[in-house]
Amino acid sequence: MWFKSFLAVLVVVLLALAPAAPASRLELGTGFTGAPNLGGYPSEMHCGSGSGCHSSGGLNQQGQVEIMGLPDRYAPGATYTLTVRLSSDMTISDSSRRWGFEITAARLDTGERAGTFAAGSLVKQEDEGTFGFREYVSHSVAALKLGQTSPVSWTLDWTAPVENVGRVGVYVSALAANGDLWRYDDYAYAGADTTDFDPTPVATTTWGWIKSRRTGGH
């Protein structure tokens, strides 16, 4: 009897002393967007591609991840609000489901960073050279959308390069997790879109030009 009581007390003490799971276990590092080989830089993994993070048995099962708000052509230095939208029915029966994503933008010719992101309350990181010093934005622990049903979305701003760098690829990987904090029965999704430089010159408007238009040049 005393031995069982001792074990029960021991278990409680060990649980109390055990460190909490670090936030980094629920957040991503860089290089998990599924971007292809670009400009000699290696292709990136996604969370279901054998990285050891999650096992989903296949990509894009009964769902999709979309990049919304990216223009067909970007103006130099212009800022665009992007929405990452994830739809999936694979965790519909899991009340503790969680959702996550990571996104990056890269030049298609060199594979290097293209533009900059403003992450807000999300997590922003910079690659140290393996993937062309690209910027990455991913979910924070507070943005895991705990228990929410599909579809879920995250919003962030992307500012285009200030000069013509040609076509830009935007790549995203997302995860529908069952919330048991284990690697199995979580489902990965990947998507991509491109945008090209807009050669249309931006007209300079001055007060004198406006007056000349109103007076017919007099």
Image (cartoon, rainbow, N blue to C red):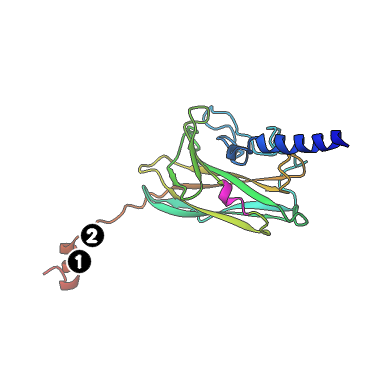
Which residue sits at x=48%, y=28%? 128
Element type at mark 1 = helix
Which residue is label 1 attached to?
Answer: 210
Q: Relative to 77, is 139 on the left or the right?
A: right
Which residue sits at x=80%, y=38%? 8
In-front residue for pair 188/19? 19
In the rendered image, residue 19 lying in the magenta stretch gets the answer: no
Quadrant assignment for the N terminus: top right
Whether pointer 2 and pointer 1 mark residues with C-beta atoms closer than 8 Å, the reply is yes
Element type at mark 2 = loop
Residue 47, horizontal then vertical, whole percent? 66, 39
Which residue sits at x=64%, y=50%? 99
Residue at the extreme right = 1
Which residue sits at x=46%, y=47%? 196
C-alpha span from label 2 to label 1: 7 Å
Q: Relative to 117, is 40 on the left or the right?
A: right
Residue 176, horizontal then vertical, whole percent? 69, 49
Which badge, 2 or 1, comes first in the chain's sequence? 2
**Around disc 1, counting alpha carbons within 10 Å, would you say few (fewer than 14), some (14 to 19), or many (20 or more)?**
few
Amino acid bearing label 2: Thr
In-front residue for pair 64/108? 64
Which residue is label 2 attached to?
Answer: 205
Amino acid bearing label 1: Ile
**Around disc 2, counting alpha carbons within 10 Å, would you say few (fewer than 14), some (14 to 19), or many (20 or more)?**
few
In the rendered image, residue 142 lying in the magenta stretch gets the answer: yes
Q: Main secondary structure of the magenta part?
A: helix
Residue at the extreme bottom = 215
Residue at the extreme left = 218
Residue 147, horizontal then vertical, whole percent? 68, 56
Magenta-tinted stretch: 141-145
Q: Quadrant of residue 145?
A: bottom right
